[in-house]
Image: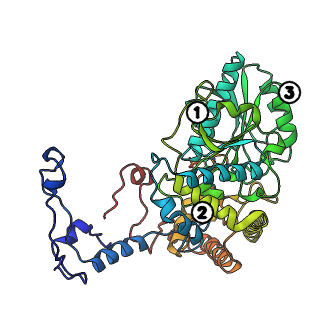
Amino acid sequence: MNKIQLIFEKGYETTKNNFVPQMDIDEIPLTELLTSDNLRTDEINIPDIPEFEIVRHFTNLSQKNYAVDSGIYPLGSCTMKYNPRINEKTARLPHFANIHPLQEENEGAIELIYNLGKDLCEICGMDAFTLNPAAGAQGELTGILIFKKYFEVRGEKKTKIIVPDSAHGTNPASSVMAGFDIIEIKSDENGELPLDQLEFAMQEGDVAGLMLTNPNTVGMFDRNILQITEIVHKYGGLCYYDGANLNPILGMCRPGDMGFDIIHLNLHKTFSTPHGGGGPGAGPVGVKADLIPYLPCPQVISTEKGLACMDNEETTIGRLRSFWGNFGVLVRAYTYILALGAEGLRRAGQNAVLNANYLRVSLHEKYAVPYDRICMHEFVIDAHLPNGVNAEDVAKALLDRKLYAPTSYFPLIVHEALMVEPTETENKRELDRFIEAMLEIYEETINNPEHLKSGPHNLDVGRLDATLAARKPHLKD
Ligand SMILES: Cc1ncc(COP(=O)(O)O)c(C=O)c1O
């Protein structure tokens, strides 16, 4: 295994050999610019390295990673779609990149926030959006706190939220964080929410409503969606739509029209902004008109004199994020929406569905697909394979073949889960490369299972203790 050298370890060995000549103007001593209590007293450990070596160091490091820009990244539930370069271009425009949230003249940024909110309202069928939350899960917490406030203001005591077992794991977590107990409902054999059980649960009386991931974590769009919202509303509940999986329904149907009161989106999934180590992301929350007063502050509103920033001090659930959220992410998502337009967004969703179904049908004879009907943007394989080969073995074998693995062991309702989400941007050649590798791996489960069980064989590291690696990562060697 190659030991990775840190840039700090490289620095002192190299000779000064930069192409940039030494500065020939007088430096102003820092002591003239800063008072002594602002000056550090210890040595600063900045390596003295020529520019080209720094570039090589970080380029080499970046190539140790697999990325969306390396090849197919079929990580189900994550929508690792290509991040178009035009998004980066606009986010780097000096008037966006160099503004400070406290400066007064930022009308352009405020207008962008307003316009993006309006576009999301149109796409989702909602009446207002806050763009402040910094991630999907933070959007969920925002939405559930709005649930809470709504019932508090009405003087109704509600303590429970219904969350199906096909929900994303953050759904029950966010509900509990907001102070609710969870009523879990098991999905039926089609991966859908049984209506009789929903009605039974709503009758408990102190139920605030339903939190539904749709399409859910097995890639199924619930065909009873209209009855679902009708039942919840009949008993005075609210309907929350986890819209992180909006990609496949873009331009086809709108959660607001299905009867949902609140939705959150993951801009870093559907709207092609980068995912990165837990952030920065954006999890905008949309609501129907009745719930607008509870949105977090600040909000951008349109007035007779133009756009204005507003704080609903009396009614808001408060502030969840400093300033306006991750503004650079908002610029990227807005660019994506404008670049694609209504027709482009619809086509993106349709292609995501087409690609997922192409993979599903190409693999389902060898790999069991428990919910084996037309899926949305993703589907789940149950990898109980010949000779005891399992999901982890398949995942490592894909890495060995210079491909990325699907999400493994999630969702929990499929025990050897491999959750495959190709996204719309993969072309047939790349999808076929993935299919070929999967079929080759299947052959190996019969001909050489031990080789699979001891993989990966072609990577810098072998099979790690996954829990330890996540909790105490050794990033260097
Ligand atoms: C359906 C769904 N809901 C919620 C989330 C949570 O979003 P985040 O990871 O941005 O907190 C995800 C994340 O991928 C998701 O797929």
Q: CA distance from mark 2 to mark 1?
A: 35 Å
> Which residue is under mark 3?
234
Q: Can you tell which quarter of the image residue 68 is in?
A: bottom right
Q: The residue under label 3 is which amino acid type? A: Lys
Residue 405: horizontal and vertical position, in percent? 57, 65
Question: Residue 18 location in percent, x, y?
Answer: 23, 81
**How many numbered discs, if any?**
3
Work out whether residue 60 or residue 398 is closer to the camera in this orientation and state it. 60
Q: How would you rate the neighbour count of disc 2 (Cα within 10 Å): few for under 14, some for 14-19, many for 20 or more?
A: many
Q: Secondary structure at mark 1?
A: loop
Q: Quadrant of the C terminus?
A: bottom left
Compared with residue 243, is residue 70 higher up or lower down, i.e. above or below?
below
Mark 2 or mark 1: name the one nearer the start of the chain.
2
Count residues near mark 3 (Cα–Cα under 10 Å), then give few for <14, some for 14-19, many for 20+: few
State yes or no: discs 2 and 1 in contact (Cβ < 8 Å). no
The alpha-carbon separation of the residues under discs 1 and 3 comes to 33 Å
The answer to whether residue 321 shows anywhere in this view is yes
Q: Which residue is mark 2?
A: 80
Tell me if residue 158 can be seen. Answer: no
Looking at marks 3 and 2 on the same chain, the residue that comes earlier in the sequence is marked by 2
423 on left or right of 46: right
Q: In this rendering, would 346 be left or right of 326? A: right
Q: Secondary structure at mark 3?
A: helix
Instruction: Give the residue at x 56% y 53%.
Output: 109
Residue shown at 59% from the left, 29% from the top:
317
Q: Nearer the viewer, residue 95 or 342?
A: 95
Q: Is mark 2 within 8 Å of ligand 1?
A: no
